[in-house]
Amino acid sequence: MSERTLRGKVAIAGVGESTYYKHGQSPDAEFKLALIAILEACRDAGIDPREVDGFASYGGDRSEAVRLAAALGIRELRFSNMHWGGGGGGVAASVANAGAAVLSGMANCVIAFRSLAQGQFARYGRGAQATAVGGDDAFLAPYGLMSPAQRFAMKITRFMTDHGIRHEALRAIAMASYHHAQTNPRAVMQGRPLTEEKYDASRWIIEPFHRLFDCCQENDGAGAVLVVPAERAKDLPHRPTYLLGAAQGGHHRSAAPVHNAPDYASAHFKTVARNMWEMARLGPRDCDVVQAYENFTGGVLLSLVEHGFVDPHHANEQLVLENLLAPSGRMPMNTSGGNLAECYMHGLEMVNEAVRQLRGKACNQVPGANVVAVLGGPMVTPVSSLVLGTEAAL
Amino acid sequence: MSISTTPRALPAGLPAPAVEPLTMPYWDGTRAGKLVIQRCRGCGKHQWGPEWICHRCHGFDLGWEEVAPRGRIWSWQRPHHPVHPALGGFGPYTIVLVELPHADGVRMVGNLLCEPHAPVTIGAEVEAVFEPHDEAHPPYTLVQWRPKG
């Protein structure tokens, strides 16, 4: 039996996005934003959109594959896929699922995308408005535990307390994203730099580790990538970006009800990261750039630890701003501004940024970047992450 | 066990727990001032939150048993930003994750009854306070926590 792997077998041939907006400011409907991003990814790849034969998404995307296929006049739909779970836990999984479809011959040309207009629909930061709630929420919402930040905060409290990690480590994560957004014309927060003083003066969302700037934005927009077989990518306009490794899921009972995961103070990447590195035959030291999904900066800390980028015993020294900045930091991170400062497109913007870094066309380019890791939404099981690389990384 | 008459932890208007077949024995227990959780009749282990199957032995014969209403703080958070209209102008308030070491280490979520800015210590011992919502339709009782005196 041949080796079962996606490594080097599929590639991202095109990336696209809509204009990114603060929530409620998009003049376009969510579905139109999806169409704009998909058409842009096809144009970038030099592929006729009618040739697309699959769609993969996550987070309960409302732009359904069959409606997209009808609207775009897709000739033949061969693959449609939704990764379970809310938020951006599935961002890397959507790309990997597209890749698996292409590798297996189920489809030839698959779009992985996310469209999200929080202005048109519900904002994530608002709690349930129902008079009664069932399931897990029956044991949470009556106690005022409703928002994503509140669902995850106690993981972060415990981990940071156990390891003596200071809030300044999270501040560095936030400031890196804002710093990189200042040179990114797509970034919603371009022109709004963040200083230590501004961060420290920002209001508490949740004590003890969530100030305003530790939390992602709420936005309107869409992003998309086009995934094709590696051989096909070589004939297309851009230098191919190869999928080197990908994994999704969660460790033992990571989503156990009412906050009963045995290993609770976790982003739930422990097995996922191991599997991803195994497929990629790489490790954190091989990466030139990291894109680490920020729903909350504490989640980034956990992601970085569980993927081996940060040692929790040295997090206070490792997570300082200069280490995280392109072009010359030890671990350039979230080089387009990420969810905090480019756009909260549920991490799809981070996949696009990883591709731009590997093409050498990023707004904060890390010279000679050959390997970029994208760590999807932490704590939102099933979580997912991936590693992309240039031909030199194969 | 007496029903507490202390003021409620949070303002009125937050979502009530829906009555569901899987979880009804718990809510029946809290109405009676008892902390009643799942315990597998096959392997004898407690589990929480409620599920139709024992995750250890795959038995469906899950019983419900009263456990001592005490535990220790496993983690905590103190929300300031109101995420629900009922919380506007209120807060901060404190949420704790309480571990019950005498019930196979299951964890429960509730509010810590304390001053808004009181320090919270992981590992601190707490005891349950039953908070009735008699005016609700149907009535229900939440389980809150206070530092052990």
Image (spheres, rainbow, N blue to C red):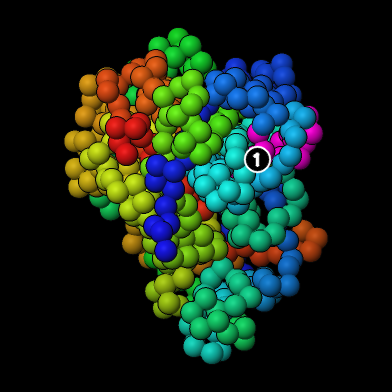
Q: Is residue A108 visible?
A: yes
Q: Chain of mark 1?
A: A
Q: Amino acid at mark 1?
A: Gly
Is A60 drawn above or below residue A288 in the view shown? Answer: below
The residue lying furthest to the top in this view is A191
Q: Position of residue B39 (x, y in %)?
A: 54, 82
Horizontal side of residue A119 vs A228, given as left or right: right
Q: Secondary structure at mark 1?
A: strand
Q: How many marks?
A: 1
Residue A18 rendering spot, x and y as whole percentages? 61, 20
Q: Residue at 25% across / 39% down in the picture?
A: A286
> Looking at the image, which is closer to me, A138 or A174?
A174
Q: What crowding class fits label 1: few (fewer than 14 Cα within 10 Å), some (14-19), or many (20 or more)? A: many
**Above or below B105: residue A107:** above
Q: Position of residue B122 (x, y in %)?
A: 34, 57
Tell me the residue at 47%/52% (across/down). A248
Range shown magenta: A52-71
Residue behind mark 1 = A54
What quarter of the picture does the N terminus of chain A occupy? Answer: bottom left
Residue A297: image location, x then y, percent:
40, 36
Quarter of the image for the C terminus of chain A: give it: top left
Q: Would you say residue A265 is visible in this rendering?
A: no
From the viewer's side, name the closer residue of A166 and A324.
A324
Residue A303's place in the image compared with A174, above or below, is below
